[in-house]
Image: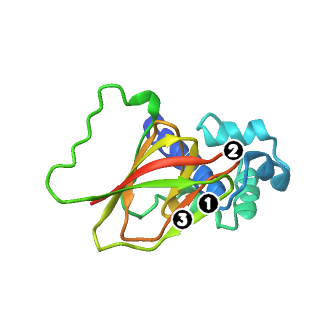
Amino acid sequence: MVDDASSGGVQAQLAGNIRRLRIARHLSLSELARTTHIGKATLSAIENGHANPTVATLGAVAGALGVPVADLLAEPELGEIRVVRARAVEGVERSFAGAPFGARELLLPPRHSHEADPGAPGSREELFVVEGKLIAGPPERITELARGDYASFPADVARVYETRAEAARAVVLRA
């Protein structure tokens, strides 16, 4: 018998992995729906952790994403990535005391992709989106961020910064 807490954890892991893999492959939800012949609403419910897909559905999604079904359920083994959504930043304070850091502004035009080379071992990057929407992070762990969102991820691996239909501007700090 599976308790509710562990099944919710598996469901959340599945939801996060499907969304992460879909974004990493530059697929919209509509494109994944067309490829798998699964309804967009069903895929959305799975990605939001509100549905329990069948084995056949998982097989179709895994096939479309080019991964084994086990990868949809696996826990990522990469460095920690933190995301703070704009709606959750009230009262959040971020301190950069301690190690020196470099700061830069990242300006990306619409439909642009930029890949950053790995930095020093153990380095991290802090990213705050000022305008637009940005897809950012290590290639296998990218996250879609909107205006006001904040993310922190390892900088000792390659990172991707990409825009879709609109330009984006972000502040990037590396420690």
Mark 1–mark 3 contact, CB under 8 Å?
yes
* Residue that badge 2 annotates: 53
Name the one closer to the observer, 120 or 100: 100
Q: Is residue 35 left or right of residue 19?
A: right
User: What secondary structure is marked by label 2?
Assistant: loop
- Per the image, the residue denoted by label 1 is 24
As helix, strand or loop, the secondary structure at mark 1 comes to helix
Which residue is denoted by mark 3 in the rendering?
Answer: 139
Q: Nearer the viewer, residue 91 or 46?
A: 91
Q: Indicate which disc, 3 or 2, sits on the residue closer to the N terminus.
A: 2
Q: Residue at x 37, y 31 (%)?
A: 89
Looking at the rendered image, the disc whose residue lies closer to the viewer, 2 or 1, is 1
User: In the image, which is nearer the foreground, mark 3 or mark 2?
Assistant: 3
Q: Position of residue 136 (x, y in %)?
A: 52, 55
Q: Residue 100 location in percent, x, y?
A: 19, 60
Q: Secondary structure at mark 3?
A: helix
Q: Residues within 10 Å of mark 3 (few under 14, many from 20)?
A: some
| Residue 1 seen in render | no
